[in-house]
Image: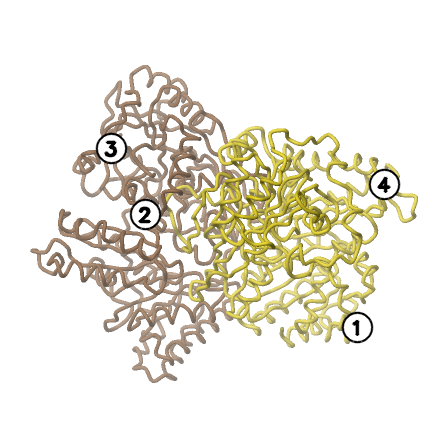
Chain colours: A brown, B yellow
Amino acid sequence: MSGSASRGLARVLRQTKRPSIPRSQARQCQPLRPLFEPVRNFSGTARQREDTGEPHRNVKYTTDMYPTLKRDPRFSEITPEHVQFFKSALGDDAAVIDGVSSDASDDLEAFNTDWMRKYRGHTKLVLRPKSTEEVSKVLKYCNDNKLAVVPQGGNSGLVGGSVPVFDEIVISLSRMNKIRSFDDISGILVVDGGVILEVADNYLAEQNHLFPLDLGAKGSAQIGGNVATNAGGLRLLRYGSLHGNVLGIEAVLPDGTIVDDLGTLRKNNTGYDIKQLFIGGEGTIGIITGVSVYCPQRSKAVNVAYFGLPSFEHVQKAYKEAKVQLGEILSAFELMDARSQGFVHQVTGNKRPLDGDHPFYCLIETSGSNTEHDSEKLEKFLEYVMSEEIVSDGVLAQDETQAKSLWAWREGITEAIGHFGGTYKYDLSIPIQELYQLVEDTRDRLDSKGLVGDDDSFPAIAVVGYGHMGDSNLHLNVPVRKYTKEVEEAIEPWVYEWIQKRRGSISAEHGLGIAKKKYIGYSRSETMLKLMKQIKELYDPNGIMNPYKYI
Amino acid sequence: MSGSASRGLARVLRQTKRPSIPRSQARQCQPLRPLFEPVRNFSGTARQREDTGEPHRNVKYTTDMYPTLKRDPRFSEITPEHVQFFKSALGDDAAVIDGVSSDASDDLEAFNTDWMRKYRGHTKLVLRPKSTEEVSKVLKYCNDNKLAVVPQGGNSGLVGGSVPVFDEIVISLSRMNKIRSFDDISGILVVDGGVILEVADNYLAEQNHLFPLDLGAKGSAQIGGNVATNAGGLRLLRYGSLHGNVLGIEAVLPDGTIVDDLGTLRKNNTGYDIKQLFIGGEGTIGIITGVSVYCPQRSKAVNVAYFGLPSFEHVQKAYKEAKVQLGEILSAFELMDARSQGFVHQVTGNKRPLDGDHPFYCLIETSGSNTEHDSEKLEKFLEYVMSEEIVSDGVLAQDETQAKSLWAWREGITEAIGHFGGTYKYDLSIPIQELYQLVEDTRDRLDSKGLVGDDDSFPAIAVVGYGHMGDSNLHLNVPVRKYTKEVEEAIEPWVYEWIQKRRGSISAEHGLGIAKKKYIGYSRSETMLKLMKQIKELYDPNGIMNPYKYI
C-alpha cells in the first residue's frame, strides 16, 4: 500500500472543482472498526462449525418448501447392512456418521442444512473418505446398490446444491485436505478436493503466488466444491475463469472409475478436454477429489479505492476509463448501490468511508509488481475521473487494514442484508449497459404492487443491487421481513423473463442447485438442455449423483 | 515503444562488468532487413493461395505414407447424385468444387494438401457453405448418407488434421467470414468460424482491443480452426487459454443439430459447459461456425528485448526473475537455442541482433498501459539480470519495425529449418526444469548412432530446440536432408517414452491430427481414452467427422 497514492488523491481534490472531501479523510482513510465477524469465516468443515444462531432444526425441510418433489423410487433405502459395508470400507469410526443403525441426529444436522439455513435434507448417513480410492469404493457400492449421494465440500453454496433433499448419502470431502505439490517456477499447485480455499491461498502467499479465485466464503469453501460449482468471485476480472486456470482434475465417476486427468501442464492438446465437464457440473456426474491449478505471481502492491458516483452511466464511464488507464493492474471493479451500503452501515454501525449520500459506490482494486507505478497510475486515473466529474468523491486505503475495511463494505453486503429476515437472491449476468436497469425495474414493480416499504406492513424491505461490474454480474437482492407468496410471485418468473429478453444468464456464478433448476430454460435452449441430459445419462445412468437438482 | 528503455539498456551496460555490446547497437537495434516473406503469411483461403513452390502433385499421398491405413468401408463413395444435392442445397456455383461429375482436380489440390506439404488426400469434392444453416443441411445429408467429411479452416495446422486422407468431403469455412458483433465496454467479440485471425485482430486494434491468441500463421488461420485445435501461441502466457477466453460457440453436429451456445457473458453457470468439448475437438464431433471471445484491452506500450544467455539454468533464472519483476506486463518469454538462430541467419542472411555466439537466446515482450512505467520496469530487470550475469548480452527494439525484426528471429525458425529438406517436428509440454534436457538427449542419441552431422552423408542436419518458455512448451525440431527410417526409428517412440516418464504432453498445442494419433497413449491413460471414445461415439455415432485421426 502506498502513501504517495493517498497524497495523490489529496492533490487531485485540490486541482478539481469538486467540493473537496475532508482533507483528513483524503489523506488518511478512517481506521474503520472491523466489520462483525462473518458467520462464514470459520475454518474447518461443517462438522466443526459452532452454531451460534438459529438451530438447524428450526430450518424448514426442503421437501416442505417443494411439496411437489417426490423421492425417486429407483433409489434404495439405506439399511444397516449398507452402513456395515461403509464402516468396513472406510475403516475408521470417524469416517461414518451413522443415523441409520445408531442415533447421530444432532451430528447429521450440520450436513443436512445449508449455510443460509434455507435448505434442509433428511440424510441419515454421512461418509467422510480420506482418499480417492475410498471415494471410488463407496461410490461404486452406491451405484451398484442404487443409493443416491450428495457430494459436499465446504457447504457454502447459495443454491442448495450441497445438501440432500431426501435421504441421499452425504459424501463429505473434508478429510481429503492435503496440498499435494507446488512448483514455484511454473506456479502450478496440486491439491486434494477438500482443501479449503483460504488455506491454499495462505500457503501460496508464503511462496509469493496467489490462488486465481477469491470469494467471501473462502474460509470454509473447499477447492473441489469451488471447481464443481465453477465459482467466479472477485478475481475473475483479472485472472480469468476456472475453465482456463484449472489444468487438471482427478474425479470419481459413479461406477467407481477414477478419472486421472490431473495434469500439471499449461498446454496439453491430446484429446477432448473431459475435465471441463466437471467444472460447473455441481457434483452431478462425479466427485472431484483432486485439482491442479495455475497460480499467478502474487502482486507486491495492492491498492484499494472507494468512490461515490452520481448515476449508473457514471459507473460505466468510470469502468471503461479504469480498463484503459489501469489496464493490466486492475484487479477488481465492484459495484454497490446506495441501499446496499446503507444496510452494511445499519448492521455494523461502522463509520461510512465517504461523507454524504451517493446513489452508487464502486470499489476498485489494483494489484501490480511496482508500488510507485501503480500509485501513479491510480493517481492519474483519480485525477481524470474527478476532474471530469465522473466520480463525486472517493477515498484510498493507506494500508492493508484499511484496504480490508473498504473491502468489508462490499463483502459484508450479503450478511448485512440477511440480518432482517429472508432474502430473495438472484445472481445474474446482464449485458453491461442494462446491468442496473433490472434493480430499478424490480423496485418499480414491487412498489407498484405495494409490496416494498419502510414500515413493517410491507413484506419486502428494499430492492438492492451490487456485484462484479467487470464481469457484468449483478446480485439482485430483495430482503424481506418474511417470505410471502405475493413477493415471490411478483418477482418470479418475471425476473427470468427480463433476463431472457436480454440473453443474460439466470445464474452467473452461483450455479443451479435446487434453487434455479426449474428456470434453466430461460438461459438455455431446448437443444442445449438435450445435450446436457445426454452427458448426465452418459456418466450417471442410474441418476444417483446429486439428484433432484441441476438440469 | 520507448526511447528511454533503450537508453536504459545502454546504461545497464555501462554499469555492469560485462563486455559492452557496441553502443551503436545498444542505442539503436540495427534496422534489420525484413525476413523473407513467410509462406504462411498470405491472406484469404486455400483456394486463393498462389503456389510459388513445389506443386501439390509432388506431395506424397498420406495413404502412401501410412500404407496400413484402409478406407473405412462404412463410408459411401460420392456419386453425381450426392453432388447434385449439394449444388442445390448450397445454391451457388462457387459453393461446390466438383471433381466427381466434372474435372476440378487442380482446384481440389489446394484443399487436399496441407501447408507443410506433408499430407495429401484424395478428395473429389469441396463444399463451401455460407451460413450455419447451410452447414447444418450438408452435414445432416452426409450423416444420413454415410459420407465422411473433413472440416477445413485456414489449413495451417501442423499435424495433418485439416486435409482428407481418402475421399472425405472437405467442408471449407472460408466463406463464413463475417465479424458479427463487438462490444467495446465488455470487450466481447462474436465472429463466424471462418474469420481469419489477423483480420479479427486488426479489427480489434482499431477499437483498442486485441485477440487473446496470436500465432505465426495468423494471416491464414481461421478462428474456428484455432478454437477447434485449441491453438496456444504467443499470448497464452499473458492472456490464458481459449478454454478460458472463448465465451460461446455455435457448432453443427453430424446430425445437423445446431449447438446454439454462442453466449456473450463472462459468467454463465447454467449446466454442463458443453462447448468446451469442441475446443480442441479437432472437428471430430462437429463443425464450429461461430465463436464468441473475451478480448482484453490492447496495450499502449509494447517493448521487445532479445538476449543471449550462457546456459539453460540461466534461462530459468531469467524467467523466474521476469515473472517477479515484470509481473503483469510480461506478455512473452520465448526460448531459442543457438542452432535455431543459426538457421534463421543462414536462410535470411539478416544481420544477427547480437554479436558473438551464445548457447541460448530469449525474447521477452512486455505489454502495458504506460510506456514509461514499462520501460522503467524493463530497465530495472535488465540491470539486474546483467549485473547478476544471468544474461550475457542483449538488445532492445526502439520502434515497432525493430520489434517485428526481433520477433522474426523467433517466428522465422520453423520456416528457416524447413528450408533444407524435411523436418521431424515435436511439440511437447515438459516440466520446466527439464525442458531443454530433451534437446540434448536427442542430440546425443542421434550423434551416438551417427545420424546427425554437417556433411551430406548424415541424414539429419541438426537437433534444434525452441518454444514458449513461459508455457513450458518445447518445439523439438530435427531438420533432415531426407526422411529416413533410421532417423525416425531413432527418435520415435523414444521421444514419447522420454515425455511419458516426465508426465509431459506429446502434443502441447498442435493437437493430434493424423501425425500424433497413435502416440496419445503416452500422454493419456486407458481410462481417459475410454472416456474420450464415449464422447466421440455420443456425438458422431457414424464416425463421419474427420475420420482416421485424433483418438
In-front residue for pair B60/B293: B60
Location of mark 4 (residue): B447
The secondary structure type at the circle numbered 1 is loop
How far is mark 3 from mark 1, CA to CA? 76 Å
Residue B36: % across, % down = 77, 63
Q: Is residue A351 depicted above or below B238 in this figure?
A: below
Q: Residues within 10 Å of mark 2 (few under 14, many from 20)?
A: some
How far is mark 4 from mark 1, CA to CA? 37 Å
How far is mark 2 from mark 1, CA to CA? 60 Å
Location of mark 3 (residue): A121
Q: Which mark is residue A41?
A: 2
Q: Which mark is residue B22?
A: 1
Q: Is residue A75 depicted above or below B84 in this figure?
A: above
Q: Are marks 3 and 1 on the same chain?
A: no
In-front residue for pair A493/B414: A493
Q: Which of labels 2 and 3 is toward the front?
A: 3
Residue B429 in view (yes/no): no
The amino acid marked with disc number 2 is Asn
Q: In screen coordinates, is A368 left or right of A317? A: right
